[in-house]
């Protein structure tokens, strides 16, 4: 039983370290969403992706308030 607890502890520590390391390296959620939107806009997911509500709702706001 003690060996199982130690093995579980080691696995949890490894997973925590792995997830924490990734978390600090990823861009913020807003940056990830912006990258995703631009990938759709650039056609990376095919033209049908441009008809999703995710894309069309953001596109409407971007069109309403364009960069100068």
Image: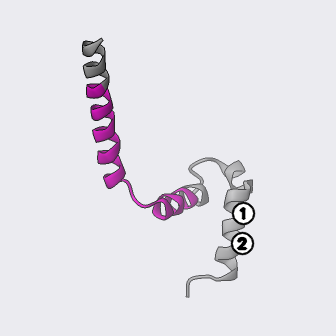
Residue 19 lies, in percent from the top left, at: 35, 42
Residue under label 2, please give it.
60
Q: Quadrant of the C terminus?
A: bottom right
Q: Is residue 51 left or right of residue 25?
A: right
Please identify the residue farthest to the top as the structure is shown: 1
State whether residue 49 is above or below residue 28: above
Quick one: 61 or 68, which is closer to the camera?
61
> Was residue 32 drawn as part of the magenta stretch in this picture?
yes
Residue 46 lies, in percent from the top left, at: 64, 48
Q: How is the image coloured?
A: one colour
Mark 1 surroundings: few (<14), some (14-19) or many (≥20) residues within 10 A: some
Please identify the residue farthest to the bottom as the structure is shown: 68
Mark 2 surroundings: few (<14), some (14-19) or many (≥20) residues within 10 A: few
Residue 48 lies, in percent from the top left, at: 71, 49
What residue sits 54% from the left and 56% below the top? Answer: 36
> At numbered mark 1, what does the secondary structure look like: helix, strand or loop?
helix
**Residue 37's disc number:** none
Please identify the residue farthest to the front as the structure is shown: 1
The answer to which image quadrant residue 52 occupies is bottom right
Q: Main secondary structure of the magenta part?
A: helix
State whether residue 10 is above or below residue 52: above
Q: Quadrant of the N terminus?
A: top left
Quick one: 9 or 24, which is closer to the camera?
9
State whether residue 45 is above or below residue 63: above
**Residue 56's disc number:** 1
Residue extent of the magenta highlight:
9-38
Total tally of numbered discs in the picture: 2
What residue sits 72% from the left and 72% below the top? Answer: 60
Label pair 1/2, CB-CB below 8 angstroms? yes
What residue sits 26% from the left and 15% below the top? Answer: 2
> At numbered mark 2, what does the secondary structure look like: helix, strand or loop?
helix
Q: Is residue 51 left or right of residue 3?
A: right
């Amino acid at each position: 039983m003690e060996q199982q607890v130690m093995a579980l502890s080691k696995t949890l520590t490894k997973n925590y370290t792995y997830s924490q390391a990734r978390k600090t390296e990823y861009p913020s959620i807003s940056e990830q969403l912006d990258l995703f939107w631009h990938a759709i806009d650039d056609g990376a997911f095919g033209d049908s992706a441009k008809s999703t509500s995710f894309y069309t709702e953001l596109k409407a706001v971007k069109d309403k308030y364009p960069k100068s």
